Image (cartoon, rainbow, N blue to C red):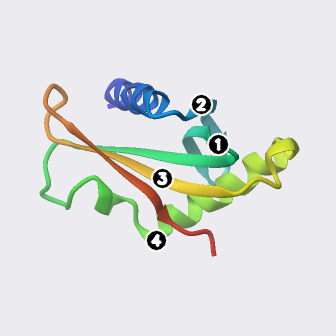
Amino acid sequence: MRVAGALFEQRACDALQQAGLSLLARNFNTRHGELDLVMRHGDTVVFVEVRHRVRATHGDAASSVTAAKQARLISAAQLWLAAHPRHAQRPCRFDVVCYDGPVEGARMSWWRDAFQAG
């Protein structure tokens, strides 16, 4: 599963870079969890959660970003900003990039500003 996760994180990173975002960090680990991608879009720091679901038996990939998961991502983002003070005053947003379906045919959905921090 880790290999598939890395594959989809790379796919998402490539697609977002093509859309004009630049990569600041990848797989930033904290006690609250991991930030898959930290990117910059203009002056905005973008925290990107990448999700993949082969089957929708428990909901699609987007529905797997629960309120509890959002809270962990917000806490991890606060730690990233504390560790990178030059970005701490920039506007921030949380995006979710989802892939649903088998690895070969999974299609990307990009939810910009998917949820708010507080």
Q: On the image, numbered disc 3 is attached to which residue?
A: 95
* Picture coordinates of residue 28, whole percent (x, y): 64, 37
Query: Mark 4 and mark 1: span between their CA atoms?
Result: 27 Å
Front one among 65 and 112: 112
Q: On the image, numbered disc 4 is attached to which residue?
A: 67
Residue 22 badge: 2
Give the quarter of the figure containing the N terminus.
Answer: top left
> Tag 4, which secondary structure?
helix
Amino acid type for the residue under numbered disc 3 = Asp
> Tag 2, which secondary structure?
strand
- Dot 2, crowdedness within 10 Å: few (<14), some or many (≥20)? some
Disc nearest the viewer among 1 and 3:
1
Q: Earlier in the sequence, mark 4 or mark 2?
A: 2
Amino acid type for the residue under numbered disc 2 = Ser
Tell me whether the residue at label 3 lies in contact with that at label 2, contact meaning CB atoms closer than 8 angstroms. no
Tell me whether the residue at label 4 lies in contact with that at label 1, contact meaning CB atoms closer than 8 angstroms. no
Q: Residue at x 83, y 50 (%)?
A: 82
User: Going by the image, does 50 lie left or right of 20?
Assistant: left
Amino acid type for the residue under numbered disc 4 = Ala
Q: Earlier in the sequence, mark 3 or mark 2?
A: 2
Query: Mark 1 and mark 3: span between their CA atoms?
Result: 15 Å
Name above or below for residue 18 compared with residue 43. Answer: above
Disc nearest the viewer among 3 and 2:
2
* Picture coordinates of residue 16, whole percent (x, y): 45, 34
Q: On the image, numbered disc 1 is attached to which residue?
A: 42
